[in-house]
């Protein structure tokens, strides 16, 4: 039996709210009255769920939901004052209809988080697993690390359909990040491992301090960092496996099954890097 909880924003609180307590599986075990009584912290302020949201619960499958869909949480009329949506989420399905604030999917380890709008800074920060999708634009530090931490994203999939800000995937260790639009400065900086695809333009200092991993560029950049050298053969098998894994993802990454091998650049040689930039021809 599936459980579907819907939180519809009724009254904006007038301050930013920590929404990390709003997770599908824990809420599925509660009654409507219990959910309405949850206290959401907001710095020096706080509010109850029932003060901000209209809460409804359905224990039977809906038209777009299979009987074994498990726990589903829908936040309707969401806005950018909702921070930490899906933070430390482990399972279930969380749909945000509207914008989300900062730290969406922070340290997420499982489940599916869909944001049908824009998201703030630190989206997917230190993400460990699961799937996070942003249909709009995104702020800085997506898939990166908190200040002072040594590991950014270490697993899972982050899909951003629009543009993203600076420091995309800073210190990323594993996982897959795809951006359908442009990326800001220092994209893939200090990358340790993982795969990043950018369909649009990249800002300055991309792949700075890259040690390993793959940066896939759908557009030829205006310049290639001087610490990267062109060349490399024998990656045709890797390329075939990569494009196959991207076949179900967003365009243009889903359209490269028959594409020719990209141009490969190895680096960042300034840090004895063994990473690679693949540029579509």
Image (cartoon, rainbow, N blue to C red):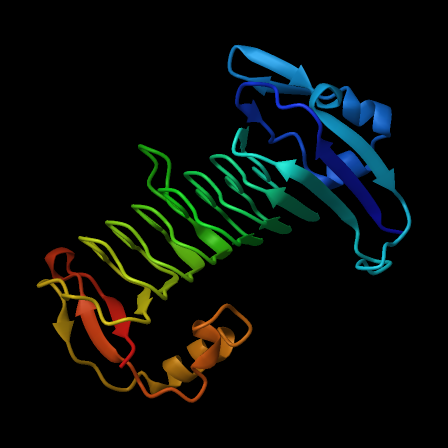
Quadrant into which the C terminus falls: bottom left
Q: Residue furthest top?
A: 44
Where residue 101 appears, as percent x and y from the top left, is 50, 35
Residue 233 against residue 115 in the figure, above or below: below
Q: Is residue 172 left or right of residue 160?
A: left
Residue 131 against residue 243 in the figure, above or below: above
Q: Is residue 208 left or right of residue 130?
A: left
Where residue 32 appears, as percent x and y from the top left, is 85, 29
Q: From this viewpoint, is residue 81 visible?
A: yes
Where residue 130 appears, as percent x and y from the top left, is 58, 53
Q: Total number of numbered labels?
A: 0
Where residue 29 appears, as percent x and y from the top left, is 82, 35
Q: Quadrant of residue 5?
A: top right
Q: What residue is drawn where x is 66% and y is 47%?
A: 95
Q: What residue is drawn where x is 43% and y is 76%?
A: 242
Q: Residue furthest left?
A: 226
Q: Is residue 73 left or right of residue 29?
A: left
Q: What residue is drawn where x is 40% and y is 46%?
A: 142
Q: From this viewpoint, is residue 91 visible?
A: no
Foreground residue, 15 or 208?
A: 15
Q: Is residue 151 left or right of residue 92?
A: left
């Amino acid at each position: 039996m599936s459980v579907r909880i819907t939180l519809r924003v009724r009254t904006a609180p007038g301050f930013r709210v920590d929404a990390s307590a709003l997770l599908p599986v824990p809420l599925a075990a509660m009654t409507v009255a219990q959910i309405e009584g949850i206290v959401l912290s907001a710095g020096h302020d706080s509010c109850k769920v029932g003060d901000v949201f209209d809460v409804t619960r359905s224990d039977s499958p809906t038209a777009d939901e299979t009987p074994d869909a498990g726990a589903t949480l829908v936040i309707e009329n969401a806005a950018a004052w909702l921070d930490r949506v899906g933070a430390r989420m482990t399972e279930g399905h969380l749909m945000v209809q509207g914008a989300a604030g900062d730290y969406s999917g922070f340290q997420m380890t499982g489940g599916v988080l869909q944001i049908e709008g824009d998201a703030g800074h630190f989206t997917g920060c230190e993400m460990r697993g699961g799937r996070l999708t942003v249909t709009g634009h995104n702020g800085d530090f997506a898939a990166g690390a908190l200040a002072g931490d040594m590991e950014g994203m270490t697993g899972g999939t982050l899909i951003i359909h629009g543009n993203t800000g600076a420091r995309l995937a800073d210190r990323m260790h594993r996982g897959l990040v795809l951006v359908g639009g442009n990326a800001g400065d220092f994209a893939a900086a200090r990358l340790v491992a993982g795969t990043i695809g950018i369909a649009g333009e990249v800002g300055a200092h991309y792949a700075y301090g890259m040690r390993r991993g793959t940066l896939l560029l759908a557009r030829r950049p205006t310049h290639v960092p001087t610490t990267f050298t062109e060349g490399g053969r024998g990656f045709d098998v890797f390329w075939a496996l990569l494009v196959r894994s991207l076949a179900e993802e967003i365009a243009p990454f889903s359209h490269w099954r028959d594409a020719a091998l990209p141009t490969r650049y190895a680096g960042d040689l300034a840090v004895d890097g063994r990473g690679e930039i693949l540029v579509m021809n």
